[in-house]
Image (cartoon, helix red, strand yellow):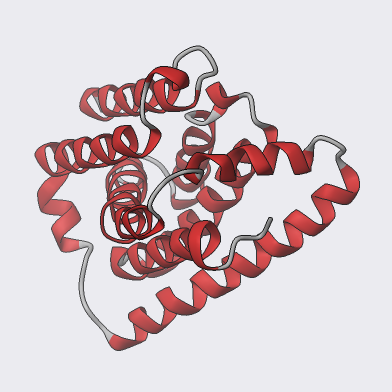
Amino acid sequence: MKKLVISIIVAFLLWTIMFSPWTKEYVHFWTTMSVSAVLLIFLSFIFYGKEIRKSIWWSWKDVGIGVLSAVVLWGIFWLGNYFSTLLFPFAEAQIGGIYNMKSGENYWIVGLLLLFVIGPAEEIFWRGYVQQRLNQKYSVILSTVVATVVYTLVHIASFNFMLIMAAMVCGAFWGLMYSWKKNLLPLIISHALWDVAVFILFPIA
């Protein structure tokens, strides 16, 4: 478990650098996010590669589940955006702050990074490594809850309530999906497609 704790601490530090109001102005978000994603994949396969490889297999059914789940999650966020802007006066500004991260960027490059690097890396690390490793020691329910809480907390340095809640919803959604399927392929597809949809193709705000 020591290697897992070290890996989570590394992720927490990287996310803090990217999102903290005291550090984010000094780094380019998409470059830092991409480098962080590659590093997380590296740590995942160095510490837990054999198990991760076993948890990825191909089936058309799982591809379909991945695509459909991305659509469902986008719908959940559309509804969440609608109701949160009604309930919380700060929601619109905070959601706008999230979308400002792509301001001035080449959308093709950002989209490709989300689709082929960032989305897959997050699933390999958070569900394929963190949650699967926790499953070996704790119950499925407890490991899913703990992995979701940790995934949520790494975003806390942003001080952006809407981003933190978004991370919690995504962590729970994909965490439950992994507990159900035990296959990372539909999660990788879901995360990658959802990222591109919500940030580039069909932004909710």
Q: Position of residue 110 (x, y in %)?
A: 37, 52
Quadrant where the image shows the C terminus: bottom right
Q: Residue furthest top?
A: 22
Q: Position of residue 135 (x, y in %)?
A: 35, 47
Quick one: 101 or 138, which is closer to the camera?
101
Q: Count every numbered label the image shows and give the total.
A: 0
Could you tell me which residue is drawn at 70 percent across and 63 percent down? 78
User: Which image quadrant for residue 35?
Assistant: top left
Quadrant where the image shows the N terminus: top left
In the picture, measured across the screen, residue 79 lies left or right of residue 202, that is right
Quick one: 180 or 184, which is closer to the camera?
184
Could you tell me which residue is drawn at 13 percent across and 44 percent down? 45
Q: Residue furthest front?
A: 104
Q: Residue furthest bottom?
A: 60
From what the image shows, is residue 106 above or below residue 89? Answer: below
Q: Position of residue 153 (x, y in %)?
A: 53, 29
Could you tell me which residue is drawn at 44 percent across and 77 percent down? 67
Could you tell me which residue is drawn at 22 percent across and 78 percent down? 58
Quick one: 13 or 85, which is closer to the camera?
85
Quick one: 107 or 89, which is closer to the camera?
107
From what the image shows, is residue 3 above or below residue 137? Answer: above
In the picture, measured across the screen, residue 180 lies left or right of residue 166, that is left
Q: Position of residue 203 (x, y in %)?
A: 60, 61
